[in-house]
Image (cartoon, grey):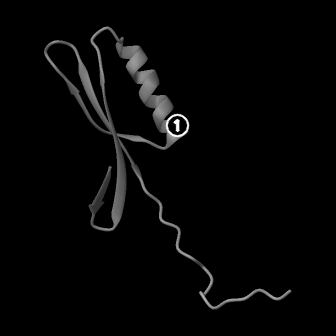
Amino acid sequence: MCHHGGRMEFEFQRFSLPRTVSRSAVRRLLVDHAEYGGWELARLRLYPDGTRKVELRRKILRVRPTLHADFRPRV
């Protein structure tokens, strides 16, 4: 899912974690997503029954061409 907020575009990932997942395991999971996937925590909701709803986001990087369309390399 993408969001066009001004100039920044984000990709979102949402998932639920059951109450049986420990707080330290949740922290490890989120740190791994941040370090290896480039995700940041957008929202975390803790419900009265102990379940967690997690929303992660990361920037979508658009690569712009650096050469003109009519450019032909010399052979």
Residue at point 57%, 77% (across, down):
65
- Which picture quadrant has residue 2? bottom left
Q: Quadrant of residue 24?
A: top left
Task: Name the residue that disc number 1 marks.
Answer: 35
The x and y percentages for residue 13 are: 35, 39
From what the image shows, is residue 46 above or below residue 38? above
The amino acid type of the residue labelled 1 equals Glu
| Residue most extreme to the left | 48
Question: Residue lying farthest right?
Answer: 75
**Is 41 placed left or right of 38 in the picture?**
left
Mark 1 surroundings within 10 Å by alpha-carbon count, few (fewer than 14), some (14 through 19), many (20 or more): few
Q: Give the percent coordinates (x, y) of residue 17.
A: 31, 20
| Residue at x 26%, y 61% (from the top left corner) | 5
Which image quarter holds the C terminus? bottom right
Q: How many marks?
A: 1
Q: Position of residue 43 (x, y in %)?
A: 26, 37
Picture quadrant where residue 36 is located? top right
Q: Secondary structure at mark 1?
A: helix
Judged from this view, the residue extending furthest toward the top is: 20
Relative image position of residue 18 (x, y in whole percent) = 29, 15
Residue at left 48%, top 65%? Answer: 62
Query: Which of the two residues, 39 or 1, is positioned nearer the viewer here?
Result: 1
